[in-house]
Image (cartoon, helix red, strand yellow):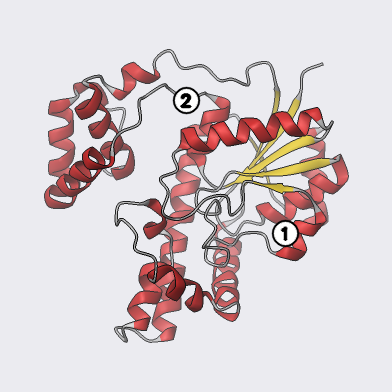
Amino acid sequence: MSKKIILLAGPTASGKSKLAIHLAKKLNGEIINADSMQVYKEFSILSSRPNKKEIRQAKHYLYGLISVKKYFSAGDWLKEAKKKINLCIKKKKIPIVVGGTGLYFNTITKGISNIPNIDLKTRNKVRNLFKNLGFVKFYERLVKLDPKVKNKILASDSQRAQRAYEVKLKTRKSIFDWIENTKSDFIDYDLKKIFIEIPRDELLKKISKRTDSMFIQKCINEVKKFNSIKLNKSLSANKLIGVQEINSYLKNNIDLKQCKELINIKTRQYAKRQNTWARGHMKNWNKVYSKDFSQLLKKTLKVVS
């Protein structure tokens, strides 16, 4: 009998963490983080990391794992996740991988190529080029450098476009040549793939409620502490939703109401990107949702049984 791994994805604020905890209790499982911002030690509030009460209810791994000063790639995450998945299985526990970072789930379902690490100098060079040229001109430059990206990466997908550029620039090989023969390390596992497909109106309410909760938990203090760390501007932690907006508030450029609304807008945009990713990369995943949590849990348990 193949080893079971539960993969639980969904847009931000859709209730993944709560569902994961209830699944862990019902199925003798343990939870592994698949959110690229919840790996950072310094951000527990703005990243909506499970709180102490939630962590006591089930074993959690890879939360608050690294410093914001560190570069942490999807490959780095996969290396750590594999260790924890194997540990869970050794303990006769079901691994429940939960989060909103589609790229992390891709490394499990499709594998990851052996692209060499790209040095910070090259990455910064590409990011500055993108910043100076903008979406359209940067994409035109990319297609000239690597014709294989045409029709495979959209000009609007700035993150993938920059990644393709830096890989070709550094390795002289297309990113698609690197990934051509990639295979998953989990082919022989029973992957139970679940995506929480929450209606838009319901999600918008949850996002707004969560933003209010972040301020009650003093997320402003979290940003102040983060500001005291001398951090390279290219590192991912700078992109966390709320950092830029709260800093604008601290500089008196906007008031608190505007700050919250800007965070809500950015979070809604992020959720939309996550849903778009799911439509393109998670077509064969089981889509679940119910406004009634007990029904949602029941539906999910049916999928994973």
Q: Nearer the viewer, mark 2 or mark 1?
A: 2
Question: Residue flagged by tag 2: what amino acid is it?
Answer: Ile
Of 179 and 233, nearer the camera is 233
Q: Residue at x 52, y 66 (%)?
A: 46
2 or 1: tag closer to the N-terminus: 2
Question: Residue flagged by tag 1: what amino acid is it?
Answer: Lys
Circles 2 and 1, Cβ within 8 Å, touching? The answer is: no
- From this view, report whether residue 216 is shown above or below residue 47: below
The numbered mark at residue 107 is none
Q: Residue at x 59, y 62 (%)?
A: 48
Q: Residue at x 72, y 64 (%)?
A: 52
Q: Secondary structure at mark 1?
A: loop
Q: Residue furthest top?
A: 181
Q: Secondary structure at mark 2?
A: loop
* Mark 2 Cα shell of 10 Å, populated few (<14), some (14-19), many (≥20): many
- From this view, report whether residue 38 is shown above or below residue 141: below
- From this view, report whether residue 251 is shown above or below residue 120: below
* Mark 1 Cα shell of 10 Å, populated few (<14), some (14-19), many (≥20): few
The numbered mark at residue 112 is 2
Which x, y percent locates residue 211? 54, 72
Of 138 and 289, nearer the camera is 138
Of 103 and 137, nearer the camera is 103
Report whether 4 appears left or right of 283: right
- From this view, report whether residue 58 is shown above or below residue 201: above
Report whether 103 appears left or right of 22: left
Task: Please say whether residue 14 is visible from this viewpoint.
Answer: yes
Measure how far apart labels 2 and 1 are at the Cα level. Answer: 35 Å
Quarter of the figure with the C terminus: top right
The numbered mark at residue 291 is 1
Task: Please say whether residue 150 is visible from this viewpoint.
Answer: no
